[in-house]
Amino acid sequence: MEDSIIVDLYFQRAERAITETSAKYGNYCSKIANNILNNMSDAEECVNDTYLRAWNAIPPHRPTVLSAFLGKITRNLSLDKCKARYADKRADGELALALDELDGCVPSCWSIEQQVDYTQAAKEISNFLRCQPSDRRQVFVRRYWYMDSISDIANHFGMSESKVKSMLFRMRSHLKAYLESEGITI
Amino acid sequence: MKNESIIRAIGEIDEDIILEASIIHNEQNLRTERIAKKKVSHNARIALIAAVLVLSMGIMAGAVYVLHNWDTVFENYFQPTDKEKETVDSAIEDVDATVSLNGVTLTIRQTIGDDYNLYAVLDIKLPDAFDMSTLIIDPDAGLPKNEHVYTYDEATDTYYYVISPCTKFGRSDSDLYMPFVSFNQTVNGTEIHEGSVDDKIIEVDPVGNTITLLVKRTFTEKISGNPVTLSFEKLSYITDSIANGGVYVDVVNGPFSITWTPSYDCSSKAYTVYNGDTEIGSVILTPFYAAMLLDDASVLGSYRQVYDSIVPEQYLTITLTDGTIIEKQSTYGSIYRETVDSLAFEMDYWFELNKIIDLNEVASVEINGCTVKPAETAN
């Protein structure tokens, strides 16, 4: 079913909107959640919460890209759950690895306690990514948005794992420099 | 959580960037694989019987090879014979790549190509809220002078303004937008501006709010096996030619971008161009394109006497073994000339052959009547 029809179902307050969303994007959301949580049961819970959030948000919101809209909700819910689960402890799975990798990427002016304006930072990160060749951009998004494993990314793009790692390393360095040059103090 | 800020900020990047790297296809493939695995066990007995049948039929009639089903746009454009379909079957791909943004959905249905050239059937579905009747040209008002601004739908006897993917053209934001030559094209993320462009609007579907394009592209970088991206800033139409005071009307803003990785296995044949005993360039033929790459174009033909200060046109003539002659006049490409008066210049031209040819049935190739011989090693 086309996304626009699914969104219309939400607007009509038809419960079928949920079943159609689940049929089309259930696996997609589960993959995102499980990449972050590394736990199928928790992931399933987050996916169900995603449908509820979508139900409450549409209407009035009409998502332009339904998959990205749902993915963002799943991602944020999964991060929230992960944060609650681990508190001060170290997360595991791909999230932990991704966090370690991004350690050197955060501009020195950021701090953990600082209330970050994600919107402005996201805009600059988007600008940075748009300046990158398509393959690098996709590799970056696969790793740090979808939290895909290095091996999955390497398989998908037909690259060696070491090439993916070096590509990500360079991009992180450039992103940090870019964010600092743009004065993202947030 | 350490570094939560950056992870959260990345989470809010633009949706088209998220979509470009989407894992949806992977998930759908996984699901298909799972279903396929289940079906294998259910159908094991049937498969066994089928295998025996195929084996016995194979002995009687030889192995059955299933060719691609051609998209109707390609069918109508090339009008290939069954033999021609077989000739280029490994060069055709069902892509079915789709992206959606701002209510616009782009779908590449099928492509056919070689290492440097491709044809693609591209559907552009406009936002549901957009009323395509606003594009209809009133016949009483007279048609715009520039034929590139309208298209005619034979089925409904209706003229529509052409909706074109438009990219900013020129040096500043206030410059014009060019329809039909407006896709940015990249291979492996690198912008490739060279090559020919001659996209055509094939169908306007006001019910489905969809426009179907036949996209025709050549590239100077190898495309087969590399991610190819077609992108554009916005969709708009022009009310008349610029000379007649036409203005551009935006339909929806992007930027829109669709990426896929073609994998064509297409034959090609190289020819060497001589002037007397001197090698001056090459011609490369594939079943649907010809590239003419000349290092010293000035010595060809008799135009030296006719054209002493302008760039001449070239004529590529392909004769098939059945006597069919395909003659193409150079219309676009790139020319390098040191000075205006210099008659020694480099010329690269690409010719769309408009039909599928079997390279084994090419009897001879000529450029302006000059000798063109098969190269010792084919590309």
Image (cartoon, coloured by chain):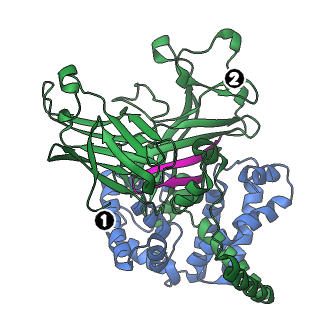
- Residue B181 x/y as whole percent: 45, 35
Q: Which mark is residue B220?
A: none
Q: Is residue A127 visible?
A: no
- Residue B115 colored in magenta in the image: yes
Q: Which residue is mark 2?
A: B136
The chain containing the residue under callout 1 comes to A
Determine the residue positioned at 69% across, 14% down.
B139
Give the magenta-colored segment's residue range: B110-125
Judged by depth in the image, the label closer to the viewer, 1 or 2, is 2
> Are callouts 1 and 2 both on one chain?
no
Query: In the rendered image, what is the letter of the chain coloured green?
Result: B
Is B144 on the left-hand or right-hand side of B168? right
Q: Name the quadrant of the N terminus of chain A.
A: bottom right
Is A177 on the left-hand or right-hand side of B26? left
Quarter of the image where one finds residue B145: top right
Closer to us: A141 or B263: B263
Q: Secondary structure at mark 2?
A: loop
- In the displayed image of the protein, which residue is found farthest to the front? B322
Q: Which residue is mark 1?
A: A173
- Kindly identify the amino acid type of the residue bearing the numbered disc 2: Ile
